Each structure stands twice: as structure tokens, then as C-alpha cells.
Image (cartoon, rainbow, N blue to C red):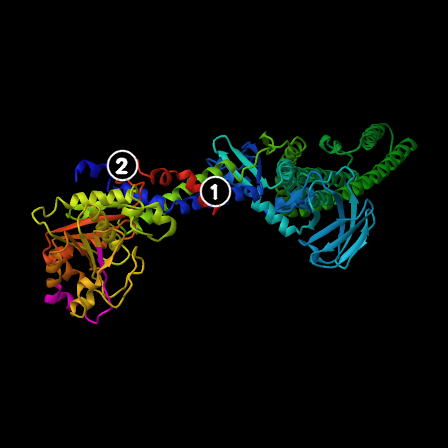
Amino acid sequence: MNPQIRNNNTLEGIDLEKLSVVIRNNWFWLIAIFLLINSVAILYVRYTKNLYESSSELKLDVKNDATELGIKSVVEDPNINLLSGEIEIIQSKLFLTRVLKHTPIDVSYFSMGRVLNEELFSSKPFYVSYTIKDPSIYNVPVYVESRNDNNFILRIGEGPDVKGSYGVPVSLSSVELTLSRNKNFQRGDEIGYFFIINSQDVLLDYLLQNLTAEPLNFNANTIRIAFKDHNPHKAHKVLQKIDTLYLQYSNEQKNLANLQKIQWLSNELAQIENRMEGIEDYFENFTLQNKTNNLDEDLAKTVQQITQIDSQRYNLNQRLLRISKLYDDLENNNFTASLSTRQYLPPGLSENLETLYSQILDQEKLTMAYTEETFAYRQKQKTIENLRLKTMNQLEELKKETSRRLGDLNHQKRTLETAFAGLPDKSTEFTKNMRFYKLNEQLYLTLMQSKSQFEVMQAGTTPDFKILSPATFPYAPISPKKTLIVGAGMVVSLVAMLLFIGVMYIANNKITSLTELENSIAVPVLGVVPTSSYIKGTGKISGLFAVDHPKSMVSEALRTIRTNLDFFNVQSTKRVIAISSTVSGEGKSFIAMNLGAMIALSSRKVILIDLDMRKNKTNLPITIDDLSKGVSTVLIRKSKWEDCIVKTPLENLHYLPSGPHPPNPAELLLDKEFIDLLTELKTKYDYILLDTPPVGLLTDGVMAMKQADLCIYIFRANYSKRIFIANLQRLISINKFSNMTMILNALPQHSENRYGYGYYEEWGETNNWKDKLKKLFKR
């Protein structure tokens, strides 16, 4: 065959004709796969709840508060930690618990549809208030059937019905319910309603599963928060509440930090105040006890006082000595007193001494004129004596006073010396308490300043986080992606169809085209017999095609084969043609019968011999009257071949049946009688057609083929396996057949190798595929 023709039927190792046959043979399954996958996609889109997602964007301002108490931060880049920390806060159960407290989702309301249940969030048929008695009521559907505007029937799970009225509490074993009718609710095509009282654990899991927080930009400190739900209003409402509460929560957390700092500072200040009060009490007592609060000054004063007292004591001792001496002098009538002595005397006493001294001088002057016995002298003497006694008395009093004062000074000195001895210890204790007091006072002032700063910060605290994009309302669902799913269904169906075709192509081990047959074995092709609509319609052969359907495509193919026979063994006038196949069912007998008929129509005498003595033919276009005679009886010389001949509707075509089943058909064909039979038939017929048994199962056919001038091997399209070609190759190699040809039988008419039989009577019917489809679906 022309290589160019072969290349047109192959593509990169793929037999396009075989591929087309696989597609034609499995078109129903391909359509079924396409419809099934796309139906699944459409049903998934139709019966899957829409999932909506509301999202928002937040910006986090980074502030480094580590130096507020004078502590330097060692964190170089806190942005990543900040974002991660805030995301963990948003997704924490502590924060979500607060969200649940401020979001009315503890009761979920649902409408029962014919296929899916839908949650009612923005518009509810009624409102439920409840008091839980038993936690078993949580997460259990409570069905509500409205009887009229005032009454309803409740059913908890699979429990009994309970009647109730709107606005009137209904007390059950596990809960007390009060239903209030929503007069603005408009009923749709739903078939009923129910509600569920959700437990906190279920709601927390619901929030955690549907909440997403992720960083958008680490450099800009932005995060994206999203919340998903089957109800767009619920998703939007919950996310709004999360954003609002998060800002409040963040502000409270920052205020909480300030409050904790202020509280700590207040406690420290209170403790410092207590310590300072104790020290102040010590100072007060010390001052009261020591009459001072400056021991250094007191120490200097004490030294100074002791010095002054010593000076005073010295002066008093000197005075006391002078006074005593003066007293003794007066007592001894010595009236002279030095000036140094007089400076220790009071003015009055000094005047008395001066007067006394003047009187004595006057007395001495009287002695010059008067005697001691004279009155004037005695009078003067008496005056002097009185004045002396008076002065002595005064000196005695002054001496006593001076002694008393000297005693006082001695006592003061002893007191000061005692106090001076205890001052160093008091000074050390006082200095220590003074140092602690100053330290506590300095710390107190510092903490008071810090507390004031934190109080100012708390008073002026504003949220550091900003909402860049508020919660969006999800108008379109994020899943299912209807267009994507339908498109994916199309793609998956096409891929599945391709995979199916690929599997069927690989799994198809049958001969599908003439090209495949010619490329597999170097045996000439005698011809191709297409399928016939007459055979397809009934599944049986009625009559001879050459007679009953002379214009059919099969008949024309047989004519072509008849013409091609002339090109084989042209030197022989009497031709023995053996027709065989690998297994039964490949159309060997059909080809033999109709090829014989077609040769007979060319005015040549033909005899068809059925050599398959193991199996009777049941689907013959002729009637055999006597089944007890045939080839088997002829070969054992029980019958003559002339007596076993069966005439056909064609005058030049005779048929020799196989006869009864012999126990040794192979041995019969090896006997000389079979060769003698062929020799005798050659004298009577132009062509002898041998319908042999299948050579893939039996050896009978090989023995008959060795006696033939031409061997025709039948392959049936889409029936014969490719391994049968190897069987033919092995048959030729072993038996050295050089006269072997092939016929491809039952090739579909839409094959490229139908030889253009388009003008025959079957063309209009076989190619009207639309009519075929209509008939198929009508069936």
C-alpha cells in the first residue's frame, strides 16, 4: 500500500481510523459520560447553598511604649510580631466570646424548603425569648407550625407536639419559650419553619471556622478580616460587630495596661507614704525629745554651751574668790579693794565699799584732831562698823548667790556633757532615717509624675487601629462558583471522555481498519467487504446477496473480489480456493457462500464444499433435505459426491454439505479420498471453494488449505483480535504458504476504505445518521 496513504491514517503512532472506530462504537458512552458529569456539576450548583464572604481591612499603628518608665526596647522590628499578635487576639476564644455577647445569633431561624433549608437572619417569622432549664435543649431543632395569627404548635426534635400562643410563655421540661409574631414577615414558598438555640461552644466553633484574619502588608501593618456564612446579611452583620468590638477591645486593652500601671503606682505610692509617715513620726518625736532636728548644729551648740558654761564657771570662781577675799579683808578690817575685785561687785556694793573707804579716810582725819574716845570719833567708828557689817552681809549674800549660780552651771555642764555623749548615736540614726526619707521622697515624686502621665494618657487614649475598609456587603457568593463549576464540568467531561476513549483505544485489541491489517502483515488484501444494513437490521442472512441484493455494497465488494481473483494464479484454469479464518464468527462461511454465488453469476460453474465436519451450518440460504449425506460420507466412500450435491437458487452454484459428524475429521482430510474428490471435482467445476474449519482452533483447515491453489484468510473488523494476525503469520511461516490472501469482512460503511460505494441502494440509508438517531431514541 502507498506509504503516503498510511501516513494519512496515523498521527504520532495513533491510528486515526481505529480511533474513529472506537469513538463510533462508544458514542453512547461518550454522550453518557458527558451528560453524567455535567449533570452532576449542574445539580451541585443547583443544590449547594451559596456561601457569602464579607471582608474588611484594618491598619495597625505601631507605638513603642517601652520607654515610658525609662526602659529601652530591645525589639528592632515589632511589626511582624504585632500583626501576628493582633491576629491571634481576633481569633481567640476570649475575644470571640465577647463578640457572642453583643451579637444576637444565639437563636438561629430556618425555613424548610423542598430541597434545602435556608437560615432567616434579616427577616424572621417570629422572635424567640427563652429560659433554659436543661442544657439538652441546646442545638436541637424546634419546629414551629403556625395554626393562625394567635396559635402555633411546637415540636422539639422528634418529640410530641405542644400547643402554644404567641406572646404567651410555653413551659416545657427543658426550656420556657415565648414566641412573638413578626407581623412584617412575608411568607414565601417554604413548607415550614424551625429554630435552634445554639450553645456557646457551637457558636464559638462556628465563629472560628468561618472567621479569617490574615496580614495584607507587613510594611503597612494592615490586616484583612473576613467572615463567611450562607446568609449574606448574617456574614455582614457579624463582621461589622467583630470590627467594632475589636476596636473597643483594643482600646480597653490599652486602657487596661494603663490602669494596671496606675494601680501599681498607687500601691507603691501608698506604701511609700506609709514609710514616710513612720519616718516623719520619728522626726517629730525626735524633735520633741531633743528639741531640735539638726544634730550637727546641736552638737556645735552643745560644745559652745559647754565652753560658755566653763567660761562662766571660771568667772564665777574668780568672783567667788575675790568676794571671799574681800569678805575676809573686811572681816579683818582691811578695807582696801582693788579695782579688779570691784569689777566682780554689783554697783551698789561697790558704792558701799567706796563709801566705807571714804568713811575710814574721814575717821583717819578725825584721829588727827580727835581721840578715839571722842564722840565724833566713836560716832564715825559706829558708822563705819555698821557700813562694814552691811557690806559684809551683802558680800555674804553675793557669795551665796555666786555659789548657787556656780552650782547651776556645774549641773548644766554635766547635763550638756551627758547629752553630748549620746549625740553621735542619735546623729547616725537620724542621718539614716533622713537618707531613707529623702530617697522615699524622691521616689514618691517620680512615681507621682509617672502616675500623672499615665492618667493623662488614659484620659486621652484613642484607638490606635483604623478601619481602612469597612465590612463589605457580599452581594455575590464566593462559592459555589457556578460558571467555574459548569466550565469545570465541561472540561472534566471532555477529559473523562478523552480518558475513556484512550482506555478503550488501548484496550481495543481488535482489528478495526484495513490500514491496521496491511501495516501488520505482508499478505496481499484480496478485498474488503463492508457491513450491510440488511444484515444489521435482522442480524441474520436471508438468501444470497448476489441474488437478493444485487445493488448492495456487499454485492459490489464481492464483485471486486471476484475480479481480483483473476490476478492470482492466472495460469490455472481450474482453481481450488480455500477460505478460512482464526475462529468462528468472522464471516468465513458468509464470504464463501456469496463469493461462490458471485462467481457463478459470471457463467462459471462453482461448487462450495463445507469441510467443517465438526459443526453443522444453521444459517444457510439453501435447504438441505438429507443431513445424513455429505463430505464425511463421501470420504469414507459411503456416498457418491453426485448424490450429496445440494442445488442453490443459482444454476451454476452447487453446495456440498459437511454431512454427519465423523470422529476423525482431520484424518479424513489426510486420506487420498479427499485428493481424489478434488481431482474429480476439478473436471466438473471451474471453481472449487473450500469452507474450512477455523485454523486457530483446529488443524483440519490447514490440511485443506494445502490442497488449494489460493487461500483466503478472513478477518472481521471490530471482531477479529490483532493476535489473529500473528496467528496467520505463524501459519504462513510454518506451512510455507505462498498463495495466501486476506479479506477484511464487515468493515463499517463509514470507514475511509469503503471504496466509494456511494451510489448504491444502501448509501441513502446507511448515511442518514439523523434518521438513525431518531430511530434509536424512539426505541
Q: Can you say whether 198 is above or below 357 in the image? A: below
| Towards the viewer: 607 or 145 | 607
Q: Position of residue 646 (x, y in %)?
A: 24, 59
Count neighbours of disc 2 (C-alpha within 10 A) and say few if under 14, some if 14 to 19, many if 20 or more.
few
Residue position for label 2: 756
Give the SS element for disc 2. loop
Count neighbours of disc 1 (C-alpha within 10 A) and say few if under 14, some if 14 to 19, many if 20 or more.
many
- Inspect this view and state whether residue 424 appears: no
| Towards the viewer: 147 or 544 | 544
The dot on residue 38 is 1
User: In the rendered image, which quarter contains the N terminus?
Assistant: top left
The single residue placed furthest to the left in the displayed view is 571
| Towards the viewer: 526 or 308 | 526
Q: How many marks?
A: 2
| Towards the viewer: 491 or 151 | 491
Image depth: mark 1 or mark 2 in front: 2
> Would you identify the image quadrant in which residue 190 lies?
top right
Give the SS element for disc 1. helix
> Would you identify the image quadrant in which residue 549 lies?
top left
Highlighted magenta segment, given as a residue range: 654-674
Going 62% across and 46% down the picture, which residue do you hit?
Answer: 116
Q: Is residue 642 magenta?
A: no
Q: Can you say whether 122 is above or below 673 in the image? A: above
Give the residue type at disc 2: Gly
Closer to the chain start, of discs 1 and 2, is 1
- Inspect this view and state whether residue 580 appears: yes
Give the residue type at disc 1: Asn
Q: Position of residue 381 (x, y in %)?
A: 87, 35
Please state if 606 lies on the left or on the right of 45 as rendered: left
Q: Position of residue 13 (x, y in %)?
A: 24, 42
Question: Spatial distance from mark 1 to mark 2, Cα to Cα?
Answer: 39 Å
Q: Is residue 666 magenta?
A: yes
